[in-house]
Every structure is written in structure tokens, then in C-alpha cells.
Amino acid sequence: MGKVRDGWSSKITFSTTQSTTEVYLYETGVTPPGLVGGGAGDFSTMRNVKYRTKQPKTLIDMSPASFVGAYSVDVYSELVDVVNVNQEITVTFGDGSTLTLWGWLDEFTPNEMVEGEMPTANMTVIPSNWNGSAESAPTPG
């Protein structure tokens, strides 16, 4: 497996509207979700003499994914059915590989519209790691 050599043409798709949302959202930048260990757990006791002792936490979290894109006004009616709906979301990387995770579109915020510039919006995806009945890890493909 090689490294991704170019971010072009990365995309985020939602399972509930995969065929129609692609017509209305046009990604110009994609930030995949990250992995977060959650910081240190303090394991110091009264027997520590000079230093605090720490241990990593057990559970891993995923940071939000985000993307910026041009959009069609028709996207509003599509996104009403996507915002806050836990579903499979696929991040497609520039080399064609994918990362599928469970989560929801949390935010669609249009940016300022300026003469001579393409209107864009910022979108945020929150990973849930929950498929509706059980914990579900992200799946590379």
C-alpha cells in the first residue's frame, strides 16, 4: 500500500442520499477525520515522590471530518434529510481508496457570497462509531 500522492479528487458521500447529494455538492477541499486518544489518565498516588504518573486511555475517539464545497441551492432540500441522521459516510481519497465510518452531517454553513467568486459552504461530519445497534469501527477500503 502506497501513500496518497495527491488530494485530488477527494470526496465525502452519505449513504442515505449518495446518488442525489453528489449532484448538489462539489467538494473543493476535504479534511478526513482524525484519531484522538483522549489525553492522559492521571495514575498518581500519594506514594509518588516527585513526578505524576500517567497512562493512555483505553478508548479512541475520532475528530470531526469537514469539507468545503460549491453547492446548488437545491442542496437545502437534500440536506434536510441528511443533517443529524446517523448513517454510513464514505471519504474517498485522491488515489481512490476509501474510509467508511458511521456518523452524521452536523453542519452546513454557507460562506459569504462575493462578486466574481464561487459560492461555497463549510460542512462538518461528526463520527458516531455506532451503526444503530453496536460499536462500529471505521473501515478502510
Image (cartoon, helix red, strand yellow):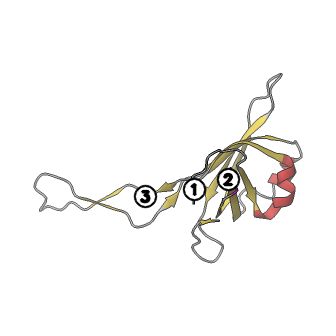
**Gap in angstroms between the C-alphas marked 3 and 2:** 27 Å
Q: Is residue 14 left or right of residue 52?
A: right
Q: Amino acid at mark 3?
A: Gly
Q: Amino acid at mark 2?
A: Asp
Q: Which residue is mark 3?
A: 37
> In terms of secondary structure, where does tag 2 sit?
loop
Position of the N terminus, as image quadrant, is bottom right
The answer to whether 121 is drawn above or below residue 58 in the figure is above
Camera-side residue: 21 or 139? 139
Task: Of the two numbered discs 1 and 2 on the same chain, state the one appearing first in sequence.
Answer: 1
Instruction: Say if the magenta span includes residue 126.
Output: no
**Gap in angstroms between the C-alphas marked 1 and 2:** 9 Å
Q: Amino acid at mark 1?
A: Gly
Q: CB under 8 Å between callouts 1 and 2?
A: yes
Q: Residue furthest bottom?
A: 133
Query: Which residue is at 74% across, 33% downward?
Result: 111
> In terms of secondary structure, where does tag 1 sit?
loop
Q: Which residues are magenta?
A: 92-96
> In terms of secondary structure, where does tag 3 sit?
loop
